[in-house]
Image (cartoon, rainbow, N blue to C red):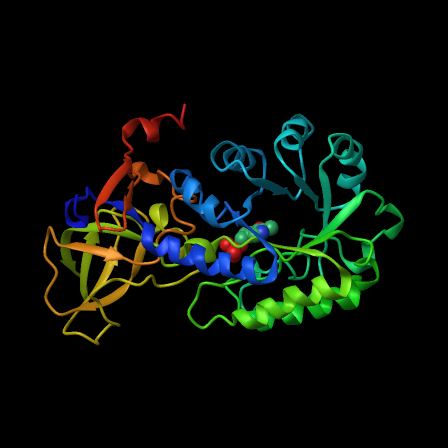
Amino acid sequence: MKIEQLPTPCYVIDEKKLENNLKILNGVMKRTGCKIVLAQKAFSMYTLYPLIGKYLSGTTASGLYEARLGYEEMGKENHVFSAAYRDDEIDEIISICDHIIFNSFSQLEKFKDKVLKAGKKIGLRINPECSTQVGHAIYDPCSPGSRFGVTKEHFRPELLDGVSGLHFHTLCQQNADDLETTLNAVEQKFGEWLPQMEWINFGGGHHITREDYDIPLLEKCIQRMQDQYGLEVYLEPGEAVALNAGYLVTTVLDTVKNGMDIAILDTSASCHMPDVLEMPYRPPLFGSGEPGEKPYTYRLGGQTCLTGDTIGDYSFDRPLKEGDRLVFGDMAIYTMVKNTTFNGMPLPAIAIRDRNGDCKVVREFGYEDFKMRLA
Ligand SMILES: *Cc1c(COP(=O)(O)O)cnc(C)c1O
């Protein structure tokens, strides 16, 4: 069916755009010999894992369930990092993961023997205490008091036996200059132990598929670790894999006035695009302008009872009316993995737009999906 015929609300993943991103990432892998795995936290649409697996080395997970999904649906290299592992999940995690990355020396000591006995690789997350993002403390693992990674002060080189790699993750939607800054800090604080490692993992947050991203500088950073220390380099971007590769199609249900024009949509920032409120940001909307740029400006809001459930102010060439369809851009990442049924909101359907522009709904949700999570 055509995109105009899809039920709303509906997330639509654009296969061609996803594949373009994958080709860019695969180019970095081919030119440098590094490995790139999908951070499922950002995008877990497993229907597309066979396509993603054609270009990337595998998956990474933040815990057992994501690890299982990557194992079952992609079946390539499977990595996991968790702030802490539970006794009742570690055996299954070890059985399905290739790299198990620990956040502390206590977790490492606790589970190390099991991992080595299974022939799997052990990584340790370090914290280079190098904040390169400003004003984004909740997305900055190097912010003061962060629970992520071992700092230099608490590093215990005498316990490194069996650890084959170091992992850091400090970036969020950043360019390669911030990676370079971070690598300098990593070398300065932990460089002494790099020669004894087999691999280093640069984490995620690299906006590699964004137009202005400096890919040559990224490749220089990768080559530096390969040449200087003989390390295998891993990257685990989430966002970059599906950046700008999806839409959220919605319908205008009503328009009201209160000092300004307001349109109510059959979606919700809070439920269907939570990063709009959490990050926060104003998502792109096709055919719209900044407030006041076009003649008719509206505040777009959701159906829920949360006053703050608004998506933003946008302007249009024509007045909005009931039944109009609006299409938000960049809705693949951190959307369907984070949505909720708060307030009984229905979950958007999930569809794929193929290379010919044909759309197919691959999943629809209903009342049972709301009820089954309550008791
Ligand atoms: C979130 C996260 C990623 C992916 O980050 P993106 O910003 O989506 O690229 C990778 N690794 C770890 C450890 C993460 O927490």
Q: Eyeballing the image, is 281 above or below 294? A: above
- Of 296 and 362, the residue lying toward us: 362
**How many numbered marks appear?**
0
| Residue 95: % across, % down | 65, 29
Q: Residue at the spot x=24%, y=45% of the render?
A: 9
Front residue of this view, candidates 164 and 231: 231
Percent x, y of residue 142:
65, 61
Q: Is residue 13 left or right of residue 27?
A: left
Residue at 61% across, 55% down: 203
- What residue occupies the far top of the structure in this picture? 375
Extreme right residue here? 158
Q: Which quadrant is the N terminus positioned in?
A: top left
Q: Foreground residue, 128 or 368?
A: 128
Q: Answer above or below: position of 368 versus 304.
A: above
- 112 vs 211, left or right, is right
In the rendered image, which quarter contains the C terminus? top left
User: Residue visible at 27% across and 34% down?
Assistant: 364
Image coordinates of residue 250 in percent, x first then y, are: 22, 50
Q: Is residue 223 visible?
A: yes
- Which quadrant of the figure has residue 352? top left
Q: Dividing the picture into quarters, in which one does residue 86 lie? A: top right
One can see residue 205 in this view:
no
Residue 208 at what x, y percent from top left? 49, 63
Q: Is residue 284 left or right of residue 147?
A: left
Image quadrant of residue 316? bottom left
Q: Which residue lies furthest to the front in this view?
A: 30
